[in-house]
Image (cartoon, rainbow, N blue to C red):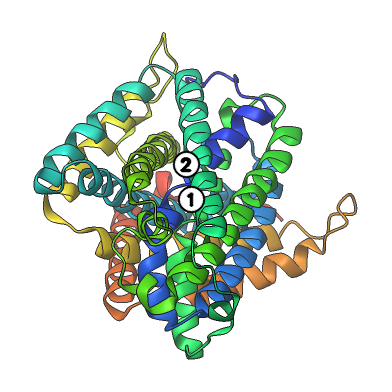
Amino acid sequence: MDRLARRLGVPDAVVIGLGSMLGAGVFVVFAPAAAAADGAGLLVALALAGFIAFCNATSSARLAARYPESGGTYVYGRERLGPFAGFLAGWGFVVGKTASCAAMALTIGAYLWPGQARLVAVGAVLAVTAVNLRGIAKTAAATRVLVFVVLAVLALVAVTGATAGDLRVDRLAEYGGATRGVLTAAGLLFFAFAGYARIATLGEEVRDPERTIPRAVPLALGVVLVVYLVLAVVAVGVLGADRLADSAAPLADVVTAAGLPGLAWVVRAGATVAVTGVLLSLVAGVGRTLLAMARRRDVPGGLAAVHPTRQVPHRAELAVAAVVIVVVALGDVRGAIGFSSCTVLVYYAITNASALTLGRDPARKLPVQVLAALGLVGCLVLAVNLPLASVLAGFGVLALGGLWYALKSRLTPSRAGGRSPRR
């Protein structure tokens, strides 16, 4: 079997995780989440989404250290719960993150050239695919530059809003949202945290995975959670919950409200860079999950090819790019976000269920079994509280995937069986 090269250390893995997360929550999700939370309940929803992401990250890190190969929960589900659980996780991840790729590409188009957003989005998909096809080292290097630029822009927004803006602490205490609204907002905000899974899906390409993955995942998540909380406080404190909910570009509006509208173009440029970084890592992660599924013939086996020189799953990444371009031509940003959140929350529910079968870990001070249980319940609760259209579309596509698996199992029983779950 072709194998991928182990070239990434802890810093590279953390950078890829940061590149996958930074951008989506700040530049895309804050406004609809604020509208769903109906007030400063946005901060409560952000804390809830962050906690569930931490539970998921703990389970992901334990499983990735045990099974250091490409595929993430697709592999963990197969090994711990059985082939169908693994397939459902992989299917949910691929379709959900393909929708995420389309949402990110459309966001790039909206910021750069609103009148030709879809055309720019297609160009962005082609560009990041070309970078990824040059090798994972090139992906990590490009992502490192993007993360540096994005952090600088976000720091500019935070400092400008806190020092020059009308930051009112009393706005942070406003809370008018119902519980359902906060749960809906948390489900949408989870879209912004799910990028740490890129580290697990790159498990076959990190050095010393038993050490690297458990360190990189919580480090990346912790940095992003702090950044999001700071910017959420600044955005709500300067704009107020209602204005934030109506904003199409919240962080640009923060600097404008602070009396520095000339900085808005810097924020828009930063948004473009941030979302490009997310898209770069997303395409890489989806391609590697597709690679893992192709190796087990859950999708056409031809997608399992690894380039002999650059050691990347070139066919899988080209297939992902092609599907994303189709979605870009047909879909919209907000619908893609809700759909992606639903399917990816199911993916992480399977992650936590898989982690529960590992038993206690005496080497860890954290109550890992309790966190896995809370993560499992939390993912399912957030998934069913998303907007109804997202829930119906997400679970409908998962059901179609299950139907495909059942038909495939009847036609090729020897291949569908796989290995029995390990306890």
Question: What is the number of the mark on residue 231?
Answer: none
Q: Is residue 278 left or right of residue 62?
A: left
Instruction: Indicate the amino acid at tag 2.
Output: Val
Q: Residue at image x 39%, y 62%?
A: 257
In the image, 318 versus 403, the foreground residue is: 318
Instruction: Determine whether the residue tagged by mark 1 lies in a helix, strand or loop.
Output: helix
Residue 345 visible from this viewpoint:
yes
In which quarter of the view is residue 119 placed? top left
**Figure check: 173 above or below 130:** below
**Figure check: 323 above or below 80:** above
Residue at the outermost left position: 115
Indicate the position of residue 91 as horizontal and vertical percent values. Answer: 38, 53
Q: Is residue 216 left or right of residue 130?
A: right
* Callouts 1 and 2 close, C-beta under 8 Å: yes
Question: What is the number of the mark on residue 157?
Answer: 1
Question: What is the number of the mark on residue 153?
Answer: 2
Q: Residue at image x 43%, y 77%?
A: 241
Q: Quadrant of the C terminus?
A: bottom right
Q: Is residue 310 left or right of residue 376?
A: left
In the image, 319 versus 79, the foreground residue is: 319
